[in-house]
Amino acid sequence: MIRKYLFTVVFTLLFPLLVGAKMESDFKRSLDCIFKALKTKNYDEEMKSLFTLDAKIGYFPKGQNDFILPQLLQILPVPTTYSFKEIESRGNSTVVDVCYIVSDKSNFLIQFLFTEENKIIHLSFDNFTNKTLKRQLKKIKILPSPFKSNFSLENKIICVKAFLNWKEELFILDNGYSDFILNSNKKNIQKSGISEDVIKGIGGKAQQMEMAWIDMFNWGGRIWKNDTKVKTAHIPQLKGKGNEIAGIIGYEVLKDKLLTLDYSNQLLEIGFYKDLNHEISEYGKLLMKLPFKIKNNLPVFYVEVNGVTYTMGLDTGATINLMKNKYLSAVENLLYDSEATSITGFNGNIKVTKYKIKETKIGGISYNNMAFSFDDHLLDKYHVDGILGYEFLKKYITVIDFKSNEIRVYAEIKQRM
């Protein structure tokens, strides 16, 4: 009888271990960290590391941990202690119900779903009974979801469709310009005086800008401008397949967002937060991460040509890569296939000679046979050694993360442009 009793006790204690089930001790470190965060209202790196990148917090969208969790910490009451209520295995995951006791002797329940690696993939507060707390949860702000848009290439310049004053129009996407700029030739805008700013066109020529009122601008249903003044400039020479260009979407619109460009499908995505899992599932293998600094609206990073390192800016409006004239002799032995061409900008065309460079190393990847031109005046306003544009962006699916100051490069584009 005693042997049978001992066997039952030992089996009860060992059974969870034998079947791989988890116990309170497996989650104590994580829950202690969350308890500490609830008391201090501080969302630190330790708490951040507890969650998967695509974790779902309550009924909010996935992958917005860094935006939602700090707000949630401010709303939830400060607990005096916590206790485990229930632990249940669900396949490779484990559900842990936790009861948090508040000083007024009330309590609230949070349910955590842990992965096999003890990362939190879901946090649920469906069992909240406090009506005030429920009302406060509704005030939590979320980031807008990303949106995709087709683009066309007009002389290698990215053009997108957006609504201006309730009419769909064509806009150039060019982070090389600092502002959202309308074409002053547009008839459906209300002019309102001269701007203090000038815009420098090709070769550094300056053009005085004006101001105009617009009723609305809407790009992809996520980016809005309503009843506001914007800058305008004369853009007569930029035409696209019979459609007049309505303006330029510049750095001011893109500066806190993620821009993904897929030239093979002429598709772009505008994101509002970093989500590597989403990117990998959409675009395949991550080939390169390249940090950059913003300088005069351009992401600036290091590039190696012929064993020499240069600072290059990324300009989505550049139809050809550019370098200063003084570097021509340093790369001369790599040049081939020269050809006369012209570059179009605000104030006209400049004739240049373009060459192909056999190899340009960027972030550990060799970009072969890119076209470059050499000119000092074209780079006057940027103060960099050179500029990369269409020739660089067309080769891979590229994410320009203006929020994290990082370029991420994915699967090589097989269909050459």
Image (spheres, rainbow, N blue to C red):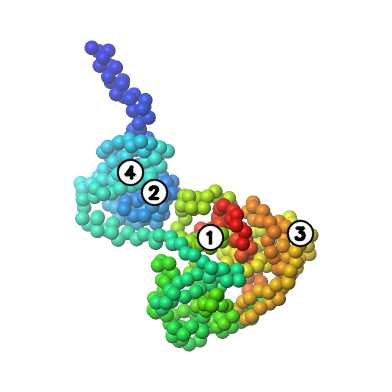
Residue plotted at (28% across, 41% down): 97
Question: At numbered mark 3, what does the secondary structure look like: helix, strand or loop?
Answer: helix
- Residue 218 at x, y percent in the picture: 42, 72
Q: CA distance from mark 2 to mark 3?
A: 48 Å
Q: Are marks 4 and 3 in contact (CB under 8 Å)?
A: no
Callout 2, which amino acid?
Ala
Question: What residue does disc 3 label?
Answer: 334
Question: What residue does disc 4 label?
Answer: 112
Residue plotted at (26% across, 45% down): 109
Question: At numbered mark 4, what does the secondary structure look like: helix, strand or loop?
Answer: strand
Which dot, 3 or 1, sits closer to the camera?
Answer: 1
Q: Are marks 1 and 2 in contact (CB under 8 Å)?
A: no
Callout 1, which amino acid?
Asn
Question: What residue does disc 2 label?
Answer: 55
Question: At numbered mark 1, what does the secondary structure look like: helix, strand or loop?
Answer: loop
- Residue 377 at x, y percent in the picture: 69, 75
Residue plotted at (66% across, 66% down): 321
Question: What residue does disc 1 label?
Answer: 265
Which dot, 1 or 2, sits closer to the camera?
Answer: 1
Q: Disc 4 or 1, which lies upstream in sequence?
A: 4
Picture quadrant of residue 290: bottom right
Q: CA distance from mark 4 to mark 1?
A: 40 Å
Q: CA distance from mark 1 to mark 2?
A: 30 Å
Q: Viewer-proximal residue, 90 or 370?
A: 370
Which dot, 2 or 3, sits closer to the camera?
Answer: 3
Question: At numbered mark 2, what does the secondary structure look like: helix, strand or loop?
Answer: strand
Q: CA distance from mark 4 to mark 3?
A: 58 Å
Q: Disc 1 or 2, which lies upstream in sequence?
A: 2
- Residue 195 at x, y percent in the picture: 51, 83
Q: Disc 3 or 1, which lies upstream in sequence?
A: 1
Q: Are marks 4 and 1 in contact (CB under 8 Å)?
A: no
Q: Disc 2 or 3, which lies upstream in sequence?
A: 2
